[in-house]
Image (tube, grey):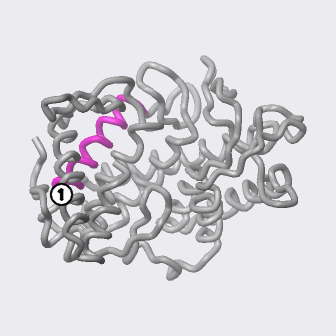
Amino acid sequence: GSLQMEWRALAAATEDPELKEGRKIVEEAMKKIMDAAPKDVLPKNDIQLNPDNTIHLVGSVGMAGLGDSWYEYLLKMHLQGGSNEKEAGYRQAFEEKMRMMMKELVRESGGPVRVTDKGRDKMDHLACFVAGSLASSVHLPGAVSLTEEEKTNFMRVAGGIAETCYNMYHMSPSGLAPEGVQFDNRGKMTCGGACYNIQRPEAVEALFYLWRTTHEQKYRDYAWEIFQNFEKVLRVENGYVGLQNAWSPTAKNTPKDVMSSFFLAETIKYFYLIFSDDDVIPLDKWVFNTEAHPLKVDPSLGETPVVDFSHNYN
């Protein structure tokens, strides 16, 4: 899922017949994926399109690369359309998948709260987005089936994940997070194999949503510490660099000669928004796509869906 919100926003803004058809195609594909993954099963992350137009899900199960935006957009499609009951199936699917995630992938014992890949006690930086999605599902309108107890649990886990994502930076010898971390049998965090840093946004994204939904000062404090480390370690004359090995006290001596496009589109934007007032891109009027571009909440989208997502998807 990295197309649906964009296609329907463009189709509504332009009235272009080709864009309208594109919207229908991507939303039909999303429904096929939902139908291919029963509600009590977390789908595998790789999508295999078969010649007969069917979908087969293969690969690993987790919340990081390949699968992350799909979960994110289950929630955000509902929010973008004004949380209309005609699209409640999106929100219900998100809530059901988060229940399964809490049961199968979230670990809270033997170390910090973390979202792991199934069968492996490791957490990718990419998975930090989960904290923001959980917090948004509780505090933004339209929850379909969450009980008050589940809302409390979602926020507890969201806060725990955000804390772990902050510690990916705070506990790193360079002050900057690697691509992923793993945990030993005592729960101690170490670099998870891919130790490079390419200025990813997901931890700052998590802190932004936790700040906006709780206004706990610690989330601004965490963000400020991370921002200072970006400035101290990654800033060069003409921009910012990455690191070959962020888990090294001499990381600055081996820069990675790249400034990712998402650093400007997402990371810096979320830093800015954490320290802005809530009426700067308010979350009840705007929804961020997976690259942090704000799309306006448009109730007409939810009122006139092109695919039936009004009820449980299976």
Residue drawn at (40%, 73%) of the image: 286
Left or right of residue 26, residue 71 in this image: right
Point out the image quarter for the C terminus.
top left
Instruction: Count the numbered circles shown.
Output: 1
Identify the residue at image location x=74%, y=58%.
227
Q: Quadrant of residue 289?
A: bottom left
Q: Nearer the viewer, residue 81 or 117?
A: 81
From this viewpoint, is residue 153 visible?
Answer: no
Q: Residue at x 85, y 55 (%)?
A: 236
Using the image, determine if residue 135 lies above or below residue 284. Answer: above
- Who's the residue at 79% across and 58% down the image? 228
Circle 1 sits on which residue? 24
Which amino acid type is shown beneath numbered disc 1?
Answer: Lys
Q: Is residue 111 magenta?
A: no
Name the spot of residue 313 as percent of width and height, x first. Answer: 12, 46
Residue 14 is left or right of residue 116, and the answer is left
Residue 11, image x, y percentages = 26, 70
Is 187 placed above or below 101 here? above
Q: Secondary structure at mark 1?
A: helix
Specify the principal SS of the magenta part. Answer: helix
Q: Which residues are magenta?
A: 89-105
Q: Is residue 259 above or below residue 51?
A: below
Query: On the image, which quarter does residue 193 sit in?
Result: top right
Is residue 96 on the magenta stretch?
Answer: yes
